[in-house]
Image: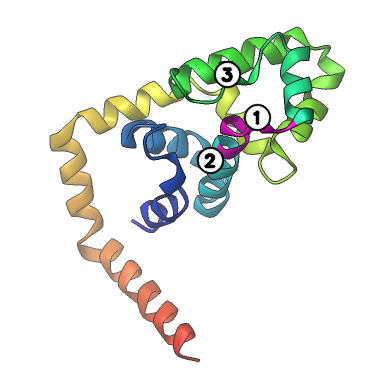
Amino acid sequence: MEDLTQVAAKSSGLAGKLTPEETLAAFSTMRESMTGDQASTGLKIVAERLMGAGEDDTRKGLLKRMGMKAGDVDLVGESIKEVLDRMSAGVEKLPEAERAGVMQKFFGSEAASAATKLIRDRSRMGYYEGVMADRAAFSGDAAEAQTGKAADRRRLGLMAERKEKEK
């Protein structure tokens, strides 16, 4: 539940660009190898960099080197899966020695690893979308997270946060 709070807080700028299922699938894919905070921040920055590529000469130049233009990745008229497929194909066109540097320049130091993970493991998004489509199992998992030890941990965490804010 804490992860959902983090991604919800940082993904409001994705409304109208990604469906809630796409947002959660992308977040969950990144979350496999990083903390919830890193994944939610990474998702936010990755999307911002893609959507704003047309306003940045450096990113436009990097896209051109990969055989694309900003409109190919701005999440307008294309799904996140299509964008990730295009980015993967574009990165593959670059010499291997340059790929990490291009990702760093395009997405920035804070989000380069998240973007790399998401592009490399983009097929995992389908798995998470399938899990979310199973409404009965998803509801059962959510109910379990709100009871027993999981709920106790969450309540203790919230109490600690409130106490910290009161200082």
Q: First in sequence: mark 3 or mark 1?
A: 1
Quarter residue 163 falls in: bottom left
Vertically, is 76 above or below 95? below
Q: Is residue 55 magenta?
A: yes
Question: Closer to the camera, 28 or 42?
Answer: 42
Image quadrant holding the N terminus, namely: bottom left
Q: Secondary structure at mark 3?
A: helix
Residue 106: percent from left, percent from top? 73, 31
Amino acid marked by disc 3: Gly
Q: CA distance from mark 3 to mark 1?
A: 8 Å
Q: Amino acid at mark 2?
A: Leu
Which residue matches tag 1? Answer: 53
Residue 82 in the image: above or below residue 159: above
Which residue is tagged 2? Answer: 43
Residue 147 vertical position relative to residue 97 in the rendered view, above or below:
below
- Classify residue 157 as left or right of residue 35: left
Residue 80's spot in the image, x, y percent?
Answer: 46, 24
Residues under numbered marks 3 and 1 in contact, where contact means CB atoms less than 8 Å apart: no
First-in-chain label (1 vs 2): 2
Q: What's the magenta region?
A: 48-56
Residue at image point 73% right, 23% down: 60
Q: Say which label, 2 or 3, has the lower sequence index.
A: 2
